[in-house]
Image (cartoon, rainbow, N blue to C red):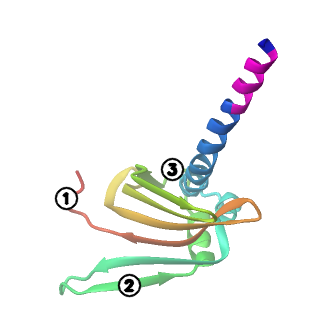
Amino acid sequence: MKRLLVFLLIINTGLVVEAQTAEDSLKSVINNLFVAMRNGDAVLLKTVFADSAILQTLVNEKAGKTVIRNEEVAGFIDFVSKQSKNAADERIVFDVIKINGDLAIVWTPYTFFYNGKFSHCGVNSFQLIRLNREWKIQYLIDTRRQNGCE
């Protein structure tokens, strides 16, 4: 009887850990993006993106027109690698996480500080894919604004 209880406890614990692992893995990849940004760490930054990743930003121009800016991952990594430690500090909150097999979405409101000063805020919308048992950022689009950031 004692062995059966231990066995059931191990199985139940394993299921709980498994259920948390995918979400925790997603958070880890996204957190690594921002750790790399804060540290100017190009090596770590390269590990979070899929080979065909796409980066975009929605920008509201002064004339009131919304435009989409595309950025190459390599250019973003190069920019980050030239930053001094703690220059690029993006603080996020995990708001929505949805997972379906090897596809996930993550929604993270953020506030961005550059060299210790508030720069802007907005929302990141991530699409992640699981390749070879690892989550990678396939698509990242964000909004940017300087008002209404509370």
> Can you tell which mark lies on residue 60?
none
- Whole-angstrom CA distance, mark 2 to mark 3, is 27 Å
Is label 3 in a helix, a strand or a loop?
loop
Q: How many angstroms separate mark 2 from mark 1 (CA)?
A: 21 Å
Circles 2 and 1, Cβ within 8 Å, touching? The answer is: no
Number of other residues with Cα within 10 Å of mark 1, as a class: few under 14, some 14 to 19, many 20 or more: few
Of marks 1 and 3, which one's residue comes earlier in the chain? 3
Q: Is residue 11 above or below residue 36?
A: above
Q: Nearer the viewer, mark 2 or mark 3?
A: 2
What residue is drawn where x is 56% and y is 70%? 79
Residue furthest out toward the right: 3
Give the secondary structure at mark 2. strand
Q: Which residue is mark 3?
A: 86
Residue 10: image location, x then y, percent = 73, 27
Estimate the x, y position of residue 138 in percent, counting from the top left: 59, 72
Magenta part of the chain: 3-11
Of the numbered discs 2 and 3, the one sitting upstream in the chain is 2
> Which amino acid lies under the numbered mark 2 shown in the image of this protein?
Ile
Residue at x-position 53% and y-position 54%: 34
Locate residue 69 relative to residue 51 in the image: left or right.
Answer: left
Name the mark nearer the viewer: 1 or 3: 1
Disc 1 designates what residue? 148
Q: x and y percent of residue 51 in the render?
A: 69, 76
- Residue on which disc 2 sits: 68
SS majority, magenta = helix
What amino acid type is highlighted by mark number 1?
Answer: Gly
Report the side of 4 relative to 102 (left or right): right
Residue 17 position in % (x across, y down): 65, 37
Work out which quarter of the rendered image holds the N terminus and state it.
Answer: top right
Where disc 1 sits, the SS reads: loop
